[in-house]
Amino acid sequence: MMLLRIAFRNLWLHKVKTLIVGAMLFFGTLLVVLGGAAVSALEESMAKSVVNAVSGHVQIQAADAQDEITLFDFDNSSKDFGHIKDFPKVKAALEALPSVKTVVPMGVNFAVVFTGNVLDKKLTELREALRDGKTERSVALKDHIRRIVADLEKDLKNLRDIANMDKVMLEMKTNFEALAEARKDAFWEKLDREPESAIEFLENKVAPIAIGEDLIGLQYLGTDTARYQQTFDRFEIVKGTMIPAGQRGFVFNNRAYEDWVKNKTARRLDKIKERLDNGETIAECEDCQTWTKQNQKQAALLVYQMDKEHEAAVRSALVKLLGDDQKTTTELLQSLLDVNDSNFGERHAFFYDAVAPHIDLYTIKIGDTLVLTAYGKSGFMRKVPVKVYGTFNFKSLEKSFLAGAYSVMDLMTFRDLYGFMTDERKKENETLKAKVQVKDVSRDKAEDELFGADAGAGVESAASATFDETAGVDMHAAGEKYTDEMLARKYSQQEIDDGVVINAAVMLKDGVDIETARQEIEATGQAQNLGIKAVHWQKSAGLVGNLVRVISIVLVVAIFIIFVVALVIINNSLVMATLERTREIGTMRAIGAGRGTVMWMFMVESLTLAALFGTAGALTGATTVLVAGQVGVPAWSDFAYFLFAGPRLFPTLHAVHVIVAFVVIGLVGLLSTLYPALLATRIAPVVAMQKDD
Amino acid sequence: MTAPSPAAPPIVDLVDVYKIYQLGNTEVPAVQGVSIRINRGEFATIAGPSGSGKTTLLNLIGCVDTATRGDVIVAGQNTGRLKEKDLTRLRLFKIGFIFQSFNLVSVLTAYQNVEFPLLLQKSVGKAERDRRVREVLEAVGLGTHGKHRPNELSGGQRQRVAVARALVTKPEIVLADEPTANLDSVTGSQIIDLMKELNHRDGTTFIFSTHDAKVMEAADRIVRLKDGRVQDASAGHAGGAVAHA
């Protein structure tokens, strides 16, 4: 058609303008197609990882709960997710639904673990060595402890010199007295005679002065561990083993384990290595420099951990490496840890070869029993020991602190920590309490009776030690003792299911629409009076679920801005063109072209532009998505890794995105032309008659 | 040449036409009480000095402007009573325009420029269109220049394209506003000769404005304007035109 020809000719004549506007339209369409594909891919991958790590497709919780379940959020401590009344019944009812594959009971809570400082640990070891009559070991330990005490005194004096204030002095006075006492030979002679009172003195008066005590916060997920492992395929054991089926136990989230349990110096070296592996350099990585400085500053803490023999071994290796035998071990370690881009590889390897074996690389080791402290539902602090079996990752979520924050434990331990009591149980306790001294007749208790409280190594509930100070009246936990046998007991499925369950993850069968299934579950709950409500995973994922939404909003805003700018520019340039072409348009009008023809002439021009560059953009976008779908987009950072749910994102092309791109670009073309086209139609034919000059 | 039959109605009939432009608060009269009749087949010129109202008069006849007062009857239609759409149709089907500065669409070739009004008419088939465009281009002597763009043609050639464009729709009147003003005198008289030839051949009415005495000589009839009024509407060499006033 003639108009099309005119449009092409005009576009060709104003090449620069056409290219600028075209480029914007091109990138706009490209962005719509790429962005659309990326957002869907992210949604899919996010769903894959969150659903298959923790949430399942649908989360269920008590219908009357105060707060809706949020699995990933900054602060869950103040929320009350209620509890499911009769889990076995719920499980049976839901698993009978054709769309449901499995229902896994759960509960989330937060606990802290106190890890003593080096002195605490060495004193415990000494006590054990003395008890077991290991003379050689106890002599070495005594020597090590004396050195720690000497170092402590030195540190304290330094501190006093720096902070020369009366008030500080007053506070430190008792510390100095205690240290002075512990420095006397007479004290150590006394320790040989009456070890217990001397060790207690050290524990109570001296150990608190030493730094390095840690308080580790752990978010955990209590669940039917066997079922959990079967159901959630993102879960994989990294170190150690999974908690044996039906038993009590704890597996650390590997990320939490590395971050909080690993020796800080070693962890910082790991982090520097990670950055370097990512292609950064120490010279340009500010964090790496900070970590290096911290490592040097805290070199003495490493030496604290070593007894004479270990220190000697480390020292000789260091002297060999650094060729300086005048310095102290601490100074040598400081030199070692002064890493830069040229020596990092060697130093890192050396640290793990020659230093790490002589220190506690992890303050809690696989196989240790750790004491978790949590505030239960009853409001009392509870302490429960649990054996650490290993560490795990959520595949692809491992790099996200937020998503990787959960550690996993069995439901029994969870319930003990959660301390929730049913009304029946409460009443029972009241009666028991009234009868006085009648022992708690819970299963656990019965076991204690059976095996005897001291039968095992006596993993004594710390509750027994601290309970009086903190709680005092909680009958259930008071006086309860956890024995080795109990910690290793295998619970039946009924025992696991029949108890407090806060929420549960429902895994659906393949291809089932989540929202439909969710409604079905809720309906079933109402019909059978189960007292539950069902929450879509995206909602229950809290922050993580919102992330994709936020990203898509950002994308939409970006696209919107691009197109608004394109609109304004196209509009402007067409208004200019209208003015430039006044004579031509007037002539056409005079010759007999109607307003409609003039209007169309402009529309065709814009639409041609939009169609040409829009098609190019959409094609480029589609090709890119197809290629990316084959090759995968590599994750460039931890955050991207988390978003991508793996090392690579594989976007898929959806026709919808291409269609949307065309609709949007068509609209932009039309809208931007409307005003200039209207202007053009108002040009009177008489202007054709205007003279040149 | 077809002699005008006295019984036939005039192709253009202006009756006491006024055109007054409003410039701020002052009224500027461009045409004051003009009454002219132009018969079919005439080769008429509107002459007069700059500002005498020549172009305004042509604009009124060409239906690109409307009179403030008085009747402008073109091809039997009183243009003052027509809607804009109908005026556009009137221009498209009955009137051909030739402009002082040629006014070709710069992005189109000579052929496409000539074809343009036929495309606007929508009623002419492709083959017929092609035949007419070729024929008219041949007639103006540009049979081999169809593929040239305006900027590849000389001024005279461009005006020939414009003439072809004006004639391709077989209009009843061709209006030309100072068609030779932008051309040298030789080329100018060639264009006038061409117009005259086509006037003779097809009987198309030509009305053109000019202030060039040599060009005026070619006209059958000269309408002299001064200050927006007709001074003398006497017949040219051929005679036969009537002025009411």
Image (tube, coloured by chain):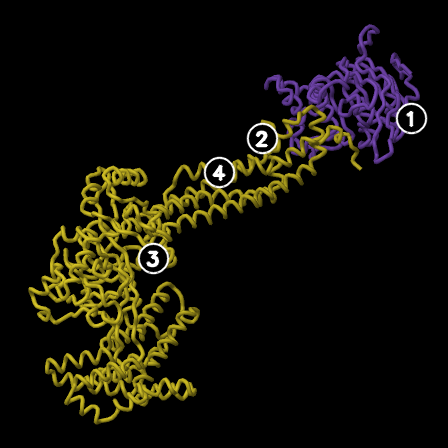
Chain colours: A yellow, B purple
Above/below status of B195 relative to A301: above
Q: In this view, does A36 lie to the left or right of A371?
A: right
Write down the chain letter for disc 3: A
Q: Are marks 4 and 2 on the same chain?
A: yes
Q: In this view, does A37 lie to the left or right of A332?
A: right
| Front residue (pair A15, B8) | B8
Which label was assigned to residue A4? 2
Instruction: Name the residue carrying label 3.
Output: A76
Q: Distance between the residues labelled 4 and 3?
A: 49 Å
Q: Distance between the residues labelled 1 and 3?
A: 95 Å
Q: Do labels 1 and 2 share a chain?
A: no
| Front residue (pair B192, A434) | A434
Instruction: Name the residue carrying label 4.
Output: A615
Which label was assigned to residue B3? none
> Marks 1 and 4: in contact by CB < 8 Å?
no
**Quadrant of res A77:** bottom left
Write down the chain letter for disc 4: A
**Does residue A19 show up?**
no
For discs 1 and 3, the disc positioned in front in the rendered view: 3
Q: Is residue A33 left or right of residue B224?
A: left
Q: How far apart are marks 4 and 2 (CA)?
A: 17 Å
Judged from the image, the secondary structure of the residue bearing numbered disc 1 is strand
The residue most toward the front is A434
Could you tell me the amino acid type at mark 2?
Leu
For discs 1 and 2, the disc positioned in front in the rendered view: 1
| Front residue (pair A236, B101) | A236
Query: What is the x, y in percent for residue B68?
Result: 82, 24
Instruction: Name the residue carrying label 1.
Output: B226
Write down the chain letter for disc 1: B
> Marks 2 and 4: in contact by CB < 8 Å?
no
